[in-house]
Amino acid sequence: MNIIRSWREIKIMLKWKFSTLNDADFEYEEGYKDNMLDRLAQKLNTSRTELEGMITELQNH
């Protein structure tokens, strides 16, 4: 069985893992998800690819 976590769960896990993140970092306007992901990657001082890898890992954890 392949259960996918909700974005809400991923957000909570990322905030737990990276204490510098807050709710404002996850805000985005409909259709502008890329801007939010780029902002998160910049705040975590990582590449967008690495951030997407972290999210994928949390999905499968």
Image (tube, rainbow, N blue to C red):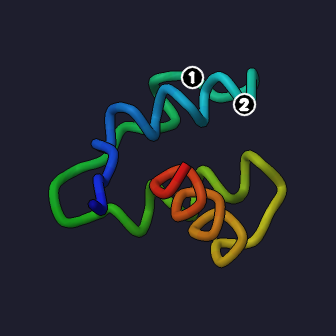
7 displayed left or right of 12: left
The image quarter containing residue 16 is: top right
Q: Position of residue 30 (x, y in %)?
A: 16, 56
Q: Secondary structure at mark 1?
A: loop
Q: Is residue 48 above or below residue 22?
A: below
The image quarter containing residue 31 is: bottom left
Q: Earlier in the sequence, mark 1 or mark 2?
A: 2
Q: Position of residue 12 (x, y in %)?
A: 49, 26
Q: Residue at x 57, y 22 (%)?
A: 22
Q: Residues within 10 Å of mark 2 (few under 14, many from 20)?
A: few
Q: Is residue 52 above or below residue 43?
A: below
Q: Residue at x 41, y 69 (%)?
A: 34
Q: Residue at x 49, y 57 (%)?
A: 60
> Mark 2 belongs to which amino acid?
Lys
Q: Residue at x 60, y 59 (%)?
A: 57
Residue bearing mark 1 = 22
Q: Which mark is residue 57?
A: none
Q: Which mark is residue 17?
A: 2
17 displayed left or right of 61: right
Q: Residue furthest left?
A: 30
